[in-house]
Image: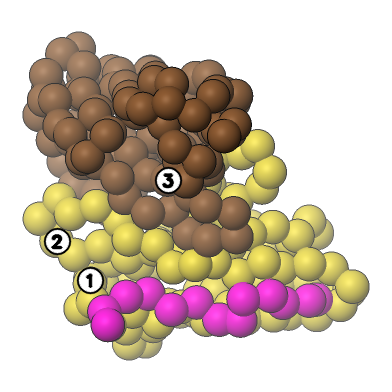
Chain colours: A brown, B yellow
Amino acid sequence: GQQLNQSPQSMFIQEGEDVSMNCTSSSIFNTWLWYKQDPGEGPVLLIALYKAGELTSNGRLTAQFGITRKDSFLNISASIPSDVGIYFCSGNSGGSNYKLTFGKGTLLTVNP
Amino acid sequence: DGGITQSPKYLFRKEGQNVTLSCEQNLNHDAMYWYRQDPGQGLRLIYYSQIVNDFQKGDIAEGYSVSREKKESFPLTVTSAQKNPTAFYLCASTGRDNQPQHFGDGTRLSIL
C-alpha cells in the first residue's frame, strides 16, 4: 500500500525557535493535509493543500505541496509552549478524501 | 455545535468479550471512518463507509465489525477475535467535494 515517511520522529526545541517537518510519499498525492493532535484528543486539521506548488499559511504555520506531488513540509515559526503535540501529515491520491494515508507523526516538545 | 461525538472516552474489555464504540456526527457528512492509533504509529484505517448501508474494510479490519444503518452513526465493535485490542480508537467523517476528514476525540480501549 501507499507509504508516507514523516520526519523527524521527534523534536525538542526552545520557545521562540522555528520548526520544520516534512513528509515524502512513495506515490503521487492529489491532496496533502497537516493535522495536530494534543494528548488524549483527536487530530485537528491545520492546513489543507490541493495543488502542486501551493504554499499556504495559517498564522505561524506554513505548509507547501511539493511540485513533484510526492512531498510536503510544515513550518512553525516562533514556537510557543502550546505548539506541543504530535503533528501528522496525510495525503490522498484518489482525488477525494474518502481514504487517507497518514505519516507516523512528529512529536514536538517546546521548552519554555 | 456541529461535530463528531465518540463515546465512551474510556472502555475496558474482559477476555472473550465484544465491546462497541459509538461514533455520532451531526455534520451531515456522507463518509465515516474508524482508525486505530498505537504509540509511535500513525493512524491505521479499520473500516470506512461512504454511504448508508455500505462499508468497506480498511487495512486492519480483522477482529472488528461495523454497521452504517443511519447517516449520523457508525458504531465499531471490537470482537473477541481481536487479540490485541488495547489502543486509541478515532472516528472521522467527511463530506463530499474533497473535504478534509474531521475527527472525534477518541475512545481509549484497555484490557482488564
* Magenta portion: prevailing SS class: strand
Where residue A88 sits in the image (x, y, percent)? 44, 38
Which residue shows up at 14% across the image and 61% down it?
B96
Residue labelled with disc 2: B96
At which x and y percent is residue B99? Answer: 18, 54
> Eyeballing the image, is A51 above or below A33?
above
- Quarter of the image where the C terminus of chain B is located: bottom right
Q: Which mark is residue B55?
A: none
Does residue A72 belong to the magenta stretch?
Answer: no
Q: Chain of mark 2?
A: B
Q: Amino acid at mark 2?
A: Arg
Q: Secondary structure at mark 3?
A: strand
Residue at 47% across, 24% down: A6
Classify residue B4 as left or right of residue A61.
right
In front here: A92 or A37?
A: A37
Whether residue B81 is visible: no
Q: Chain of mark 1?
A: B
Graded by Cα atoms within 10 Å as few (under 14), some (14 to 19) or many (20 or more), the crowding at tag 2 reads few
Range shown magenta: B1-13
Q: Chain of mark 3?
A: A
As for residue B5 lying within the magenta part, the answer is yes
Residue under the point 42% across and 45% down: A36
In space, the residues marked 2 and 1 are separated at their CA atoms by 7 Å
Residue at which label 1 appears: B30
- Please name which of the two marks, 1 or 3, marks the residue nearer to the observer: 3
Residue B48 shown left or right of residue A10 in the figure: left
Q: Mark 3 — residue? A: A36
Pointer 2 or 1: first along the chain: 1
**What x and y, as percent, mark residue A84?**
52, 41
